[in-house]
Structure formats: C-alpha cells, structure tokens
Image (cartoon, rainbow, N blue to C red):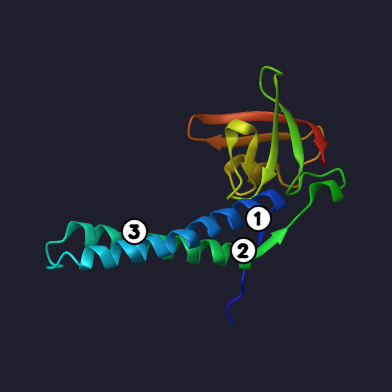
Amino acid sequence: MATVDKMPMLAEGQRMLNDELGRLRAERPMIIDAIEEARAHGDLSENAEYHAAKERQGQIEAMIADIEDKLSRAQVIDPTELSGDKVVFGATVTLLDEDDHPITYQLVGQTEADAKTGRISYNSPLGRALIGRQVGDEVEVTVPSGDRYYVVDKIEFK
C-alpha cells in the first residue's frame, strides 16, 4: 500500500499555488481555440501552429496535474503557532558565519524557497542540516561552493 507524503508549506505558498493553478486553468480555453484555429488551416502534418499549440496544451496539463498533486498533499503550517528551542519547518533562524556575520533564513516548502529573500527549503542541504538544531549548535554543510560552517544564533517563529 503506497503512502502519500504530506508536503509542508506556509499559507503563502498554498496561495501562490492556487493562483498559478487558476492562471493555468484560465489558459486552457485559449489553447483549445488556438488548436481549433490551427486545424482550420488544413494539413496538420506540416502545421507548426498546431504542433506548438498541442505542445503547450501538454505542458499546461502537466503543470496543472503537478500543482493539483502538491495542493492535495499540502500540510499548511503557520509559524506563528509554533514554539520551542529547536529548528523546525517554518522557523526563522539567524546563523553566524565563519566571520561572525549574521545570516537569517526561514525554512519553507520547496515551492516557496527563494534564497535571495532569505527563504530556503527544508529539503536543501542547509535546511536539512538545520532541522533539530538549537541555539549555540554548530552546523557544517557541504554546498556546491564548498564546506560552510555556521553557529545557530537565534530561532524565531514569526
């Protein structure tokens, strides 16, 4: 019997997926119209418009199925309702790097991750290394640019 893994995400991530799903579903009728229009041009074997529209239709259907799967497995977590002294999904963690410069990350779901805005996936190398850590713990993580060393300075739930 197969088990369905829950996919943790913040409410914002769920909202983003729902918005994208709505946008893709709204595009469906336009693609169908483009396919019908291309069919009207005659010979389908050498009809680039038809093939492009069919390819786009396949892409949209795959993206819709993927998003629907993620939403069906979504486990929405509100970090403001969390507490404790260990790093968990949704926590905002301030780390000190090797030069004692503070770096702050929030552990989020894969669909919400954006390192430029300080949001990393709980499944990323650093995210996995942080889960379960406490203030004062040293963290060593191997990333493509080499080994990095951090100390957990602060854990917040906001």
Dot placed on the residue nearer the N-terminal end, 3 or 1: 1
User: Which residue is tagged 1?
Assistant: 14
- Estimate the x, y position of residue 89 in percent, counting from the top left: 73, 49
Asked if 97 appears above or below 132 in the picture, the reply is: above
Q: What's the CA distance linking mark 2 and mark 1?
A: 7 Å
- Estimate the x, y position of residue 150 in percent, counting from the top left: 68, 29
Q: Secondary structure at mark 1?
A: helix
What's under tag 1, amino acid-wise? Answer: Gln
Dot placed on the residue nearer the N-terminal end, 2 or 3: 3
User: Residue 136 versus residue 50: which sits nearer the camera?
Assistant: 50
- Estimate the x, y position of residue 76 in percent, counting from the top left: 73, 58
What's under tag 2, amino acid-wise? Answer: Leu
Dot placed on the residue nearer the N-terminal end, 2 or 1: 1
The quadrant the C terminus occupies is: top right
| Residue mark closest to the camera, 3 vs 1 | 3
The quadrant the N terminus occupies is: bottom right
Residue 68 sits in quarter: bottom right
Check contact, mark 2 vs mark 1: CB within 8 A. yes
Crowding around mark 1 (Cα neighbors within 10 Å: few <14, some 14 to 19, many 20+) is many
User: Which residue is tagged 2?
Assistant: 71
